[in-house]
Amino acid sequence: MDETAVKVEHLWKTFRIPHERRNTLFENLVGFFRPNSYEAFTVLKDINLEVGRGECIGIIGDNGSGKSTLLKIIAKILRPTSGSVKVCGRMTPFLELGVGFQPDLSVRENIRIYATIMGLPKKVIDERIDDVIRFAGLERFEDAKLKNLSSGMQVRLAFSTAIQTDPDILLVDEVLAVGDMEFQQKCFRVFEDYRNSGVTILFVSHDLNAVRMLCDRTLLLRNGECADFGDTNSIIDKYIYKSDSSSDAEKSSDKERASTRKEIEIADVKFIDKYGNPNENFVAGDPLSVRIFFDAHERVRSPVFGIIFYHEDTYCYGTTTEFKGSDTGVISGMGYVDFIIPRLPFLKGKFEVTVAVTSHDYRTQYDWHDRRYAFNVHNPTRDLGMMLIDGTWSLHRDA
Amino acid sequence: MLLSVSHLRELIGFRDLIIRLAWSDFKLRYKSSALGFFWSLLEPMLMLLVLYVVFTNLMRIQVEHYQLFLLLGIILWNFLDRGTSMSIWGIVGKPSLVQKVYFPRDILVISTCITALMMTALEFIVFVIFMLVFRVMPGWTVIYFPLLLMLELMLITGLSMALSAMNVYFRDVQFIWRVVLQVGFFATPVIYPITIFPEGVRWVVMLNPMAQIITIMRDCVLYSTPPGAASLSYVVLSSATSLLIGYLIFERLEPGFAEMI
């Protein structure tokens, strides 16, 4: 038996996005003499990947970096523009749960449909259908129509059905993102079981922790290119500390500055560590100051500086100088304001920062830098999660 | 290459899926209506009634067993009408099956055609009841019945392959096809016998494979007349051509399905 499960060689994928979408025959006939111009959008550039049998590979990257496209090409759903994909073994894609569900049919019938789509033979479905219903906890609803089930029940049903497949290669795309915590953990355990039983897994996720726990090696995609491939921990670190992409943001802000004339500009933002030096990496619980450098071209009375912290898509915290009751007075020329955090309340991850400056009544926005700055927080403890909560345990015995 | 032995073998491997999709589609059509299956029978029945009244009393068409003649024509035409109209939506109407999982995409079209076959089978049950009521017994030539039905299925599958694939790229194919079907209904000897045309023009009408299928079927089932070798081979040839061209078009357009839907 070949030891390679998936082999991707020199894979390119370009989407052609027409400037004007012609969806009907009529539009095509009319437009025949006016050739439609296309925007070529290259999503994957020269991807090479070799996955051994039984390996678990994580694929990470920002939105739009081509992760899902890569998975869809491996799953044969999309065709590569050039290059080749070789897959040895039975492959099951988990790109979406509950593909082919019919809301008007009963739970039982839907299990049969979905299981058949996932490639289970009829005999196996007959044997396992009761297990699936029990595992999903839907014994009382087995003859109900699917549309009468809550969406949580539907997801549970879909997942219990999907895990009946026994593939050699499993493609997983963000399946963990749906459902509650308990469901996510259940999913995670199932993937671990799959991995331990020797199934090759390709795992696309934004949940870096899950990738860290599950995957041996990880592929980092950046703008469709293979930025790096190797040991999961070092790749994830590289992703968090995103070394070379900050220069792009710098460039775009230059352009912005040149094109708009503002009363007050945000010239730069620096994160100051406990030694008073600008830094991008911080340890949870340490002091941090966000230093906002401004350049006022005119005399402005009491402008308001604001700051927002984001973690992935979560809006963590936002405040302004006005909320905190500090008046900035009359400002002209250059200078900076500090937002001083004595103890950083974030535990770990990459945090992005939006900085803005507006007039005292918030009516006029002078400048707004949306999530242009970022810092990383490192966890010195064994605690879990994103936030740092100062807490201690205390035990009391009744006797 | 989709029309190859290896692809056929792959399809056979997916037979569970084809049947399951066809069957669930079939069920869905009747699931939420109180009268269930009877709805699908009601439609051709009402049409039969109207056409029968009009054509026997006003047009005075002289055909032996005209009720059965008409019903058989309508059922066979409905098979084509339904099969192709449903299949046009076979790809466009199921985006998650195209974009989120992989199986050979022609399965979606094949299963829809099988759904149409199931619905037609239901109508043939009514046809048998009518034959018993009117005491018409088919002769030995009825053995051609399954063959002709399969040839029509081939013809429909071929058309459906082409139409469903083109509808992904040009959404007005469905409207154009509706018009073609309307014209086809009157250009095909469904409600009238081929003999209303003058001798010299008949061969033009009979170039339409549906005209051949309906005429041969009537001869075999109602009038115990075996088909001529020429017309039967014409049907075989045109069904095979339809399937071939349908698959060629489908194969050419298939790579872009997931992106275009």
Image (tube, rainbow, N blue to C red):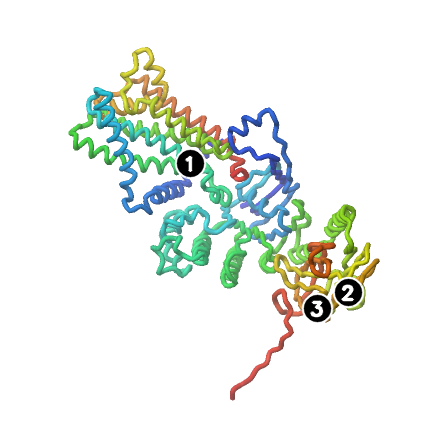
Q: Residue at x 47, y 41 (%)?
A: B103
Question: Residue tagged by mark 2?
Answer: A328
Depicted B31 relative to depicted B173: above or below: below
Q: Give the image location of residue A288, x and y in percent.
A: 74, 66
Q: Which mark is residue A324?
A: 3
Quarter of the image where one finds residue B117: top left
For discs 1 and 2, the disc positioned in front in the rendered view: 2
Position of A46 with respect to B229 (left or right) is right
Tag on residue A68?
none
**Camera sees residue B161:** no
3D distance between C-alphas at marks 3 and 2: 11 Å
At which x and y percent is residue A17? 60, 37
Asked where in the image residue A354 lies, by quadrant, the reply is bottom right
Assign a secondary structure to mark 3.
loop
Chain that bears disc 3? A
From where the camera sits, is residue A67 visible?
A: yes
Q: Chain of mark 1?
A: B
For disc 3, the neighbor class at 10 Å (few under 14, some 14 to 19, many from 20) is: few
**What chain does mark 2 sit on?**
A
The residue at which mark 1 appears reads as B109
Q: For the residue carrying disc 2, how many other residues have a C-alpha within 10 Å: few (<14), some (14-19), or many (20+)?
A: some
Is label 3 on the same chain as label 2? yes
Please state which amino acid type lies under the numbered disc 2: Thr
Q: Mark 1: which secondary structure?
A: helix
Disc 1 crowd, CA 10 A, few/some/many (<14, 14-19, 20+) = many
Labels 3 and 1 positioned on one and the same chain: no
Amino acid identity at mark 3: Lys
